[in-house]
Image: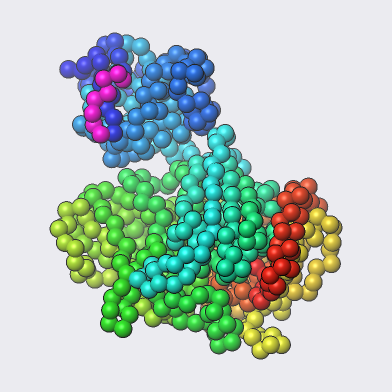
Amino acid sequence: MLSKSLEVRSKDNKINKDSKFNMGSKVNQANKDKVARSEVMSWQNTVVPAVKLETYSIMRRLPPTEDNKLELDTYFGYHWDIFQNLYNHPYIILKHHKGHVYENDLIHQHVKLYLIRCGVDLFFFKLNRIELSLVEFGVVYLIVYSFRVFDGLDSYYHSFVDTDYYNEVPETGVTREYWFDLQEVTVAPDGIERIALTVNGTIPGPTIEADWGDNVVVHVTNNLASSMNGTSIHFHGIRQNYTNQHDGVVSITQCPTAPGSNYTYTWRATQYGTTWYHSHFALQAWEGVFGGIKINGPATANYDVDLGHVFLNDWSHETSSSLEIVSESQGPPTLENALINGTNVYNDSGVVTGSRFETTWEAGTSYRLRLVSGAIDTQFKFSVDNHTMLVIANDLVPIVPYNTTVLNIGMGQRYDVIITADQESIGTDFWMRAIPQTACSNNDNPDNIKGIVRYSTSISSDDPETTGYEYTNECVDEAMSDLVPYLSKNAESGTSLLEAVTLGRNTDNYNRWYMNSTSMVVEWNNPSLLQVYENDTMFTDTSGVVRLDTANEWVVFVIDTTMPVPHPIHLHGHDFNVLAQGTGTYDSSVTLNLDNPPRRDVAMLPSAGYLVIAFETDNPGAWLMHCHIGWHTSEGFAIQILERWDEIEPLIDYDVLEDNCNAWDSYVEANSVEQDDSGV
């Protein structure tokens, strides 16, 4: 029998005596499917028409306090008490997909977020019923301490995945604000101490978290006085639609922010998924100035627990700036180690230092891992022994899920994967592996970059004894045929531009990378946006400028090389379409895939091969395209795209641009700072 008064339990499972859903009558459980399909339709007519995400926006602006009761009561059909309970209590449940019954448990945060965040009038309390009606996706039954989501939820959930996020963004009315303090601190991520540059004192830095449609404001204070480093923060993969000035690239969108100065970035989360931020000043990103960005939104497959970011970074016990001298004169240096989420062990002359990344999983539970390669020059293969990964996104693009056991991830790339803890019959302790590919990466610790997955039933503290999957030592992307965007969009052929990549030496006999015979050198104190604002079209020969003045035109870049070195190509301000990718010489016989090709913001130019990418000129600004190997960017492997010149100047806040440049100029003059790299 069902109680007429359903008690609400809090997170610690204690009954909240003051919070009850008062029910007027009982529902026969055997008839619940019938009710779900027949009653809800008539209820919909009594509810305010749904506008996606408006409820969440209202709840954020007007939390359910007594002061806001009248307005919320009016909006929610005079059932404010229900929403107060939903807002105040951290409901807990194990799954967030349809058809799963939860006995003697509480409603999980995931469900709470779907019910409040992802819809509008998702709840309607029908008097004399024991159901909550979710207008757009059926009925949720509160049956004593059980909870069931019927099949409408799944279709509603996927309706968000189907949304064309390039043209439609939720209006949340929410602003997320963060404060970053760049500091020089002593760190020992693998047990070996060294000075590093950090965000708020940690490596990785704090995660920026927002919801799809939110506004994000990041205040950056540069306290890197000892190293006399300027700085900037680039929000990797964020398209910055019509906010080019906040892309955070020195010499392109701003002057460096001087030590002792502040800079504020503002942008909107028009995409959702996994990415990261990092400095775009010299090699600072690989000195520790980076962290995660998590934008909550729909996914193309169900999972139980979001584990957040898993960063893969190569790591040296020397500073990147000192190693750059080696790279310029001799070629890429060999790094001592690599880290998983900022930690690993190191064998220092027979003495093992540091500690491994560990995570505990519950058997039968599925976990979302947000993989990010923050490496300066290491291609990884990622795996968890005995487990299969379901890949659901590349970069910030949801894809049709596919299974793999070993995942290729290049510098700057991101993959979202779901792994189910379903191997308890095999064991309870498993290696998580990030394996540098020696075909293109040099590391002194290639077989020992590991984390540990322990099931909650494990009683061991020893290293796992599992065996890794077999793999081919190679530096490649995941197969194009696997990276199918869930939101289908075709590409178009258009104006083609050829960018030949070569390596040479400058007059000082240092290595320099070239695109179409130009090795980029731009000036910290004269960013491109300043030149655009002043209508100064006289860019230097080393500026690497490509002007694309026509709006909404498809442009195809053919990037090729005869060099036996792969390069991760990153474009700011856009997701690009990968039309072709292969080894050998590119010519007219190569077939271009225009039918919903992979979309992303970093793709691999294969060793002695070609990469063909296309995008539409739909975002005015000065956008950098570059190799995401840190040494190569520093050595000139970049071009800048000036997109829709006439529309850029009105987007520029000149006062902010000028004030920041003046502060930098004053600092340089007082401290005799010299530029010794490409400027980006």
Indicate the position of residue 503 as horizontal and vertical percent values.
63, 83
**Percent x, y of residue 646:** 81, 52
Of residues 508 and 354, the one nearer the viewer is: 354
Q: Nearer the viewer, residue 342 or 359?
A: 342
**Res 280 → quadrant:** bottom right
Q: How many marks?
A: 0
Residue pictured at 68% horizontal, 53% vertical = 244
Residue in view at x 74 percent, y 54 percent: 659
| Quarter containing the C terminus | bottom right
Left or right? Give the position of 6 relative to 43.
left
- Does the magenta run of residues contain 229? no
Residue at the spot 26% in from the left edge and 20% down from the top edge:
17
One can see residue 23 in this view: yes
Principal SS element in the magenta part?
strand
**Quadrant of the image for the N terminus?**
top left
Residue 15 is a magenta residue: yes
Residue 573, position as x, y percentages in the image: 64, 55
Q: Is residue 351 above or below residue 313?
A: below
Q: How is the image coloured?
A: rainbow
Left-right relation of 170 to 334: right
What is the residue that sits farthest to the front in this orientation?
A: 670
Q: Is residue 617 above or below residue 466?
A: above
The location of residue 46, given as percent across then percent down, is: 46, 14
Q: Residue at x 16, y 53 (%)?
A: 457
Q: Is residue 520 left or right of residue 190?
A: right
| Relative vertical location of residue 104 with respect to residue 225 in this rendering, above or below | above
Is residue 520 something one can see in this rendering?
no
Residue extent of the magenta highlight: 12-19
